[in-house]
């Protein structure tokens, strides 16, 4: 029996917990046992769960899981010998991918419909962390918030020898994507670790120029 901690970053709500439990109940009961932890701070939910689970699945409280998505994450993790971080693709009401795996230039990648596909970064509205990754690099750690926290975790996992992959298909929907919460300075520090000085500096100059034109001069309002 594999144990799964479902970490939901939201206030505890009976209706929300019932929805997630219903999805968990669709997984083979003789294979997986689920425990649920709610907290608006994902790190705090993770600390409450502790370190004795085989899998940790984090979910943003704003997403609605698609049927069979939890089992898909777990099944693909088993396929990859439980040694990879797996991120799920989330789509908005118009079918656009708003969260999932990202490439070098921080653009979101489309999932393969059948097999897990590699990615460089992950945006953690829905993600699975196997126990070996947790034991190696721990929780998010509070260094970043929002989207950058997922990016940072993916970089740390890769440096520890664990790949990041995108689960097949769409695992959840979200009416409006929560604020990515990224700043130019934080992105630059993250890029230094991920891309090196030259590529990170070039990305910083481009981001600063966009910020100057769009935010300060308001040419595109």
Image: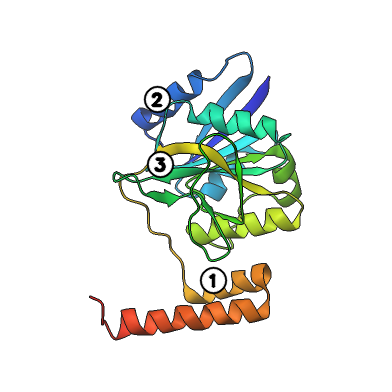
How many neighbours does mark 3 have within 10 angstroms: few (below 14), some (14-19), or many (20 or more)? many
Q: Quadrant of the N terminus?
A: top right
> Does any portion of residue 145 appear in the rendered image?
no
Please tell me in which quadrant of the rendered image residue 160 appears. Answer: bottom right
Q: Quadrant of the C terminus?
A: bottom left
| CA distance separating discs 1 and 2 | 37 Å
User: Which residue in the protein does label 2 denote?
Assistant: 18
Question: Foreground: 167 or 8?
Answer: 167
> What residue sits 48% from the left and 48% below the top?
110
Q: Which label sits on residue 61?
A: 3
> What residue sits 47% from the left and 72% below the top?
183
Please tell me in which quadrant of the rendered image residue 66 appears. Answer: top left
Query: Secondary structure under badge 2?
Result: helix
| CA distance separating discs 2 and 3 | 12 Å
Residue 44 image offset from top left, x and y in percent: 55, 47
| CA distance separating discs 1 and 3 | 25 Å
Residue 31 image offset from top left, x and y in percent: 64, 18
Badge 1 or badge 2: first in the primary sequence: 2
How many neighbours does mark 2 have within 10 angstroms: few (below 14), some (14-19), or many (20 or more)? few
What is the tally of numbered marks visible in this picture?
3
> Does any portion of residue 177 appear in the rendered image?
yes
Tell me the mark number nearer the camera, choosing from 1 and 2. Answer: 1
How many neighbours does mark 1 have within 10 angstroms: few (below 14), some (14-19), or many (20 or more)? some
Query: Secondary structure under badge 3?
Result: loop
Question: Foreground: 127 or 119?
Answer: 119
Residue 143 image offset from top left, x and y in percent: 59, 63
Residue 219 image offset from top left, x and y in percent: 26, 82
Q: Disc 1 vs disc 2: Cβ atoms closer than 8 Å? A: no
Q: How are the residues colored?
A: rainbow
């Amino acid at each position: 029996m594999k144990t799964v901690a479902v970490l939901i970053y939201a206030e505890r709500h009976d209706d929300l917990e019932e929805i997630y439990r219903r999805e968990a109940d669709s997984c083979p009961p003789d294979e997986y046992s689920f425990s649920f932890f709610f907290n608006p701070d994902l790190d705090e939910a993770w600390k409450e769960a502790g370190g004795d689970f085989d899998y940790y699945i984090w979910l943003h409280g704003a997403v609605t899981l698609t049927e069979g998505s939890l089992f898909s994450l777990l099944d693909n993790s088993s396929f990859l010998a439980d040694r990879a971080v797996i991120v799920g693709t989330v789509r908005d009401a118009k079918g656009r991918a708003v969260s999932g795996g990202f490439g070098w230039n921080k653009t979101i990648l489309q999932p393969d419909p059948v097999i897990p596909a590699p990615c460089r970064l992950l945006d953690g509205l829905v993600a699975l962390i196997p126990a070996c990754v947790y034991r190696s690099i721990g929780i998010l750690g509070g260094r970043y918030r929002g989207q950058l926290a997922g990016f940072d975790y993916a970089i740390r996992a890769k440096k520890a020898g664990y790949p990041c992959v995108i689960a097949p298909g769409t695992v959840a929907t979200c009416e409006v994507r929560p604020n990515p919460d990224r700043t130019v300075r934080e992105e630059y520090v993250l890029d230094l670790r991920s891309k090196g000085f030259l590529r990170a500096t070039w990305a910083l100059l481009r981001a600063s120029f966009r910020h100057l034109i769009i935010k300060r001069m308001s040419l595109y309002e």
